[in-house]
Amino acid sequence: MSSYLFLLCPPYSGSTLLWKLLSTSANVSSLPSEGQFLPELKDIMRESPWKAEAELPWPDIKRVWETYWDRDKPLLLEKSPPNMIRTRHIRRHFQPVRFIIMVRNPYAQAEGLMRHNNWTVQRAANFSMMCLRTQLDNARELDDALVMTYESLVEDPARACTRLADFAGELADIDQQANFEIHSIDGTLSRPITNLNGKKIAALSADDIAAMNEIFIEHRDTISAWGYDLLAAAPTGAQAVPPPAEPGGREQPL
């Protein structure tokens, strides 16, 4: 019997990289794109994607997704970022189900939100804080979940893959040496797992960081729970982002 695996990850936080890594397993069936963008569902799932109280026709969504999944595979994978606010509904309609929860340094995520969506600094910073708070709640409330960070994945892929395999034995054959075509700050390139935080944070101006910090300082506890720090000044390409700790006493990534 197949089980469902939902990747809960905010936008511009490495979800595509992790999704493609998981999809290298012969035991995983992935949708051809994010489930929310499938032609049968886009109008429904993209109308108010980040409205937590929005009612969605989950039985219909499940039926559509199951026409795309290979149900002979042990794991059926889905990665639409708004799923992170829909876990109550997902647990009701998809069983058995497991979750992978991932976040990214909020400065790096906010840079992506600004660059791709033409958002203001304030909107990007507020959204990144919503994501960290929501994922912290998910990490504390979901029992059958692996909690990790973008940084733990890209700084030590071998260790990350071991944790993934320990969490779900079906993932023991994922290929950490593969190249992945990802749209990033460098454009769309095919390359191995690479940490792009330095480039993204270096692209922020001193004014950007100051404006972000006005918002981030109000959420210092949430940021700290993930092991992140506030930046005191404009970064340079040489500045390191400290590796984050897992929340809730979970195993700390290296």
Image (cartoon, rainbow, N blue to C red):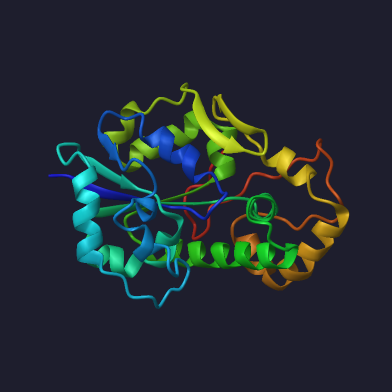
> What residue do we see at 31% from left, 70% from top?
56
Q: Is residue 111 visible?
A: yes
- Is residue 127 positioned above or below 96 on the image? below
Q: Identify which residue, 45 or 147, lies in the foreground.
A: 45
Coordinates of residue 189 in the picture (x, y in percent): 58, 28
Q: Position of residue 23 (x, y in %)?
A: 35, 34
In the picture provided, is 13 more to the left or to the right than 204?
A: left
Q: Is 138 on the left or on the right of 5, as rendered?
A: right
Relative depth, front residue between 166 and 249: 166
Q: For the N terminus, which image quadrant?
A: top left
Q: Is residue 95 visible?
A: no
The quadrant in which residue 183 appears is top right
**Given the current orientation, which residue lies at the most extreme bottom position?**
53
Residue found at x 34% / y 38%: 166
Q: Position of residue 69 (x, y in %)?
A: 23, 43
Does residue 182 appear to the left or right of 124 in the view shown?
left
Q: How many marks?
A: 0
